Image (tube, helix red, strand yellow):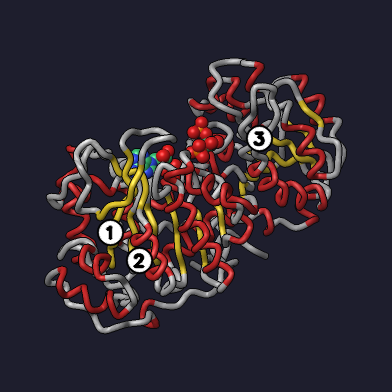
Amino acid sequence: MASASFSLLPTSSSSSSRRRVAAVPLSGAVALRSPLRRLGFAGAAADSLLTAHVAARIGAVVGRSGKAPRGVVSMAKKSVGDLSAAELKGKKVFVRADLNVPLDGDSNITDDTRIRAAVPTIKYLINNGAKVILSSHLGRPKGVTPKFSLSPIVPRLSELLGIKVEKADDCIGPDVEILVDSLPEGGVLLLENVRFYKEEEKNDPEFAKKLAALADLYVNDAFGTAHRAHASTEGVTKFLKPSVAGFLLQKELDYLVGAVSNPKRPFAAIVGGSKVSSKIGVIESLLEKCDILLLGGGMIFTFYKAQGLSVGSSLVEEDKLELATTLLAKAKAKGVSLLLPTDVVIADKFAADAESKVVPASAIPDGWMGLDIGPDSVKTFNAALDTTQTVIWNGPMGVFEFDKFAVGTEAIAKKLAELSGKGVTTIIGGGDSVAAVEKVGVADVMSHISTGGGASLELLEGKELPGVVALDEAVAVAV
Ligand SMILES: Nc1ncnc2c1ncn2[C@@H]1O[C@H](COP(=O)(O)OP(=O)(O)O)[C@@H](O)[C@H]1O
Ligand SMILES: O=C(OP(=O)(O)O)[C@H](O)COP(=O)(O)O
């Protein structure tokens, strides 16, 4: 049966089978022009593709040493799919899911992605005659807070499962135990928000023991919360055996660890978002693994400034200028093709109705700020992406919340959809990039869209997630 061992993915090519193309000398921007022009880039784009530091080897995939990349997290865990019908029938199974979905002011669910993502594991359990005790948090309540009740989840979950889901008003205690005892085989009981107890986030062992006492075995399918060492994600595993991964958790690991550590190459990473400081870990980790790194979003202005360009009033982290220079040098040293946008859409103010125009990255006037990547950059990025077999994307290319500055982000989303249709593995690493992909309406065609923002970022940084580490090891590990 499937264990959480990255076995669901298309077979990756080994490092020795990476496509190697004669390296383009990196001694200066001049050296970059002809290969870029051969690839069809306009003179200005080729000329301004940024600096001698930046290894702009589009289409040229870098041969690097075949040794395992640093920071590869091996999280091969036993899966719920490893549990047979005989092991599940009549058993009380504590399932930790992440049902932390957005609700509007009237408690209507505005995005049910996380509920739908939890369904395969629950269905597997009920189809095998288990009694499912479902647990989640919602929001960040301080004590019992009615607006953070999980009650609004029940109708949609019942609809998706095709059965009536029961709901408890608490997550521990005698009333909950009575409801658990009356659960039929194939029944589901949703516990109340586990964060109504402060002991949850404190990972209090006594609280974890009380949660565990409700069940015979444990399934963690809460990927979005797997980076939290809380009682229901980590503590409970000390009292319940087996403790296994659900199908969603397994799929997230397959893609965010498996596909990224052992990708079909060429492998491109696209990193955007507001600040370099929030993405340092991810950029450093991806530099160890990818062939091409495309940078966009607000962070690019720190890189521009580090290279002596004027950035007007664009977002800059003055204390990260040195870091930006170091990252560019690191990319060069590792032979990674790091591309910065060659043109940007600038605005006269940070507003949806701002005046805007497109300028080369080297010509941002005083008083103007860059809020999106420009059309030449989109062309350049698309051409680079056309050479790839695996792409991971984290962070928007611009202020996509304002339509006027969403064009670059939406173009990348469309490109990834197109590549996905051609068999390229496309992974959207959580957070705002997921919102962008959904806005464009191409979420369904991507290979994988992560359900966890913070959790996916930590995985991409090469960190281990406590909620995963705590689970039982898979018997056979095939990383
Ligand atoms: N050029 C820019 N200037 C200011 N903010 C930007 C710029 N480009 C993108 N952003 C903002 O970055 C935010 C997303 O950043 P971040 O949280 O790091 O990404 P993610 O949520 O994908 O991890 C968005 O709200 C977006 O408006
Ligand atoms: O929504 C979540 O995280 P995310 O916003 O990083 O995707 C998870 O449910 C974790 O919630 P938390 O950040 O309150 O622990």
Q: Amino acid at mark 2?
A: Thr
Q: Report which residue position mark 1 lands on.
A: 342
> Quick check: marks 3 and 1 in contact, CB under 8 Å?
no
Q: Is residue 133 above or below residue 328?
A: above
The percent position of residue 129, horizontal first and vertical second, equals 83, 48
Q: Secondary structure at mark 1?
A: loop
Q: Which quadrant of the rendered structure holds the N terminus?
A: bottom right
Q: Is residue 164 left or right of residue 197?
A: right
* Disc 3/disc 1 C-alpha distance (Å): 37 Å
Q: Secondary structure at mark 3?
A: loop
Q: Earlier in the sequence, mark 1 or mark 2?
A: 1
Q: Report which residue position mark 3 lands on.
A: 110
> Quick check: marks 1 and 2 in contact, CB under 8 Å?
yes
Q: Report which residue position mark 2 lands on.
A: 380
Q: Nearer the viewer, mark 2 or mark 3?
A: 2
Q: Amino acid at mark 1?
A: Thr
Q: Quadrant of residue 84?
A: bottom right
The percent position of residue 383, horizontal first and vertical second, equals 39, 70
Q: Earlier in the sequence, mark 2 or mark 3?
A: 3
Q: Nearer the viewer, mark 3 or mark 1?
A: 1
Q: Is residue 128 visible?
A: yes
Picture mark count: 3
